[in-house]
Image (cartoon, grey):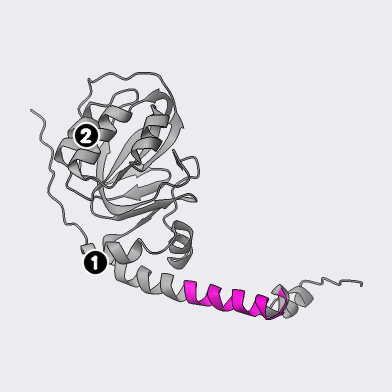
Amino acid sequence: MIHVNTAFDRPDPDLVKQLSGYSAATIHEAQGRLGALDSTIKPVDPEMSLCGPAFTVVCAPRDNIMLQVAIAHASPGDVIVVSAGEYAEAGSFGDVLANACVAKGLGGLVTDTGVRDTRELRELGFPVFSYSVSMKGTVKETIGPMAEPVLIGGEIVRPGDVVRADADGVVVVRREDLAHVIGRSQARVEAEDAYIADYRAGKSVIEVSRLAEVLEAKGLVIDE
């Protein structure tokens, strides 16, 4: 008999909401350029966006039985994070399972395998970020871990860590780092707003970014 545990600590919902106000790229930079999943994992629609605690699951390639188990046991707002070995030639998730997720109030899906029914997924609006698009069907055979740390897109994602994804990609934030990363993200937004204001006031990018001394030290000479 195989036992899986579905109990884990979830982050403060207020902190999750605050984090959702920042882009994935801003968060990645704010936490020291950490946490970004491989760029092969992309949204089915560039307008799709998600932010929520990870509900992790491991699936065998071309097998979605554990994905269905995860959907059944995840809580509203959870983002299903599927580690399936970066297998492109399988459509392990489509409009039928997406409707099951919407009915449960889940926050989205991030997977390193394929999905299908992409037109219907876009129309439904359920956020899906996948390694590939493939029409090829799957089997329901192999039992695997759930609500345990998984490797996906070159990053370890633990259950309860927060996943933020948008048109630029997917980033994960450790649950215990949420408040710190939110503060760093806000500081980065304010700094970038100041840069933009300086550009609009007529300053050059070299002046704003303080590159003159750096370029001089590297021996760059510009003849005008």
The answer to whether residue 86 is seen in the rendering is no
What amino acid does circle 1 point to? Asp
64 sits left or right of 3 in the view: right
Relative vertical location of residue 10 with respect to residue 145 in this rendering, above or below:
below
29 sits left or right of 68 in the view: right
* Image coords of residue 19 (percent x, y): 34, 64
What distance separates the C-alpha of mark 1 from that of mark 2? 26 Å
Local secondary structure at mark 2: helix
Residue depicted at x 22% and y 26%: 65
Residue depicted at x 42% and y 65%: 31
Q: In which quarter of the image is residue 22?
A: bottom left
Q: Residue 100 carries which label?
A: 2
Please report whichever mark, 1 or 2, sits nearer to the chain's N-terminal start. Answer: 1
Category of crowding for the residue at label 1, using alpha-carbon neighbours closer than 10 angstroms: few (below 14), some (14–19), many (at least 20): few
The answer to whether residue 44 is seen in the rendering is yes
Residue depicted at x 54% and y 75%: 193
Residue mark closest to the camera, 1 vs 2 = 2
Q: In which quarter of the image is residue 89?
A: top left
Category of crowding for the residue at label 2, using alpha-carbon neighbours closer than 10 angstroms: few (below 14), some (14–19), many (at least 20): some
What amino acid does circle 2 point to? Ala
* Image coords of residue 35 (percent x, y): 41, 55
* Image coords of residue 66 (percent x, y): 22, 31
**Magenta residue check for 213:** no
| Quadrant of the frame with the C terminus | bottom right
| Residue beneath disc 1 | 14
**Could you say which is closer to the camera, residue 101 or residue 149?**
101
Relative vertical location of residue 37 with respect to residue 140 in this rendering, above or below:
below
In the rendered structure, which segment of residues is drawn in magenta?
189-204
**Magenta residue check for 198:** yes
9 sits left or right of 108 in the view: left
**Could you say which is closer to the camera, residue 110 or residue 128?**
128
